[in-house]
Amino acid sequence: MALLSNFPLIIALFAILFAQGVKVPIHYIATREFKPGLAFSTGGMPSSHSAAVTAVTTGVGIEHGLSSGIFAVSCVFSIIIMFDATGIRRQAGEQAIVLNMLVKDFQYFVDEAKGWSKKKQFEKKQELKELLGHQPIEVFFGGLTGILLALLAYPMF
């Protein structure tokens, strides 16, 4: 039962669920395209990674104080995770776009060269995941989401 009273953990998990769920209406408002699968995918606005780590860090700061060592550790790890979301993971997504284009171009060449364009495709190949990382604005709003959720929910604990 002590686990259920762990505010930083509870608010971080809630922040993940909230950020993932809100991606669907935000995407719909921005593009008029309804994609419920966004709630279960990586990338997009807001960043659930950023929401989770800022929520847990805010929760730790509220409970243990901003001068505590545990807050410092949480803060540093939050910064690393958010930096990674905009850097390495974003670049992996950019590379996936290029690789998917190469695969399509190669497949088109093979189809044309061997006359496969008239045949049925027996097996569909899954494309590499292109939406891996986040743009800086997505990380910013994810982080803001986590902080606000933690500050609003703490009085309920």
Image (cartoon, grey):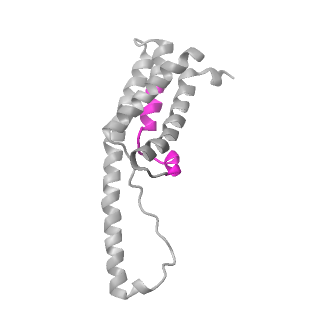
List x then y, in percent, for residue 13: 55, 32
Placement of 151 over or under 52, stated as above or below = above
Does residue 8 appear anywhere in the picture? Answer: yes
At 48% from the left edge and 78% from the top edge, which residue is drawn?
Answer: 121
Question: Which one is in front, 52 or 137?
Answer: 137
Residue lying at the far right of the rendered structure = 1
Residue 125 lies, with reference to residue 46, above or below; the image says: below
User: In the image, residue 109 lies at what x, y percent?
Assistant: 31, 79
| Tag count | 0
- Which x, y percent locates residue 118? 43, 86
Report the front residue among 84 and 101.
101
Q: Residue at x 44, y 36 (%)?
A: 49
At 44% from the left and 41% from the top, the residue drawn is 26
Instruction: Give the quarter of the figure containing the C terminus.
Output: top right
> Hey, which quadrant is residue 135 in on the image?
top left
Q: Is residue 10 left or right of residue 50?
A: right
At a point 37% along the width and 38% down the height, the residue shown is 138
Magenta highlight on residue 54: yes
The magenta stretch spans residue 72? no
Q: Provide the major secondary structure of the magenta segment.
A: helix
Q: Vertically, is 122 above or below 153? A: below
Q: Is residue 132 visible?
A: no
Q: Quadrant of the N terminus?
A: top right
Counting from the top left corner in percent of width and height, residue 151 is at 48, 19
Q: Which residues are magenta?
A: 35-56
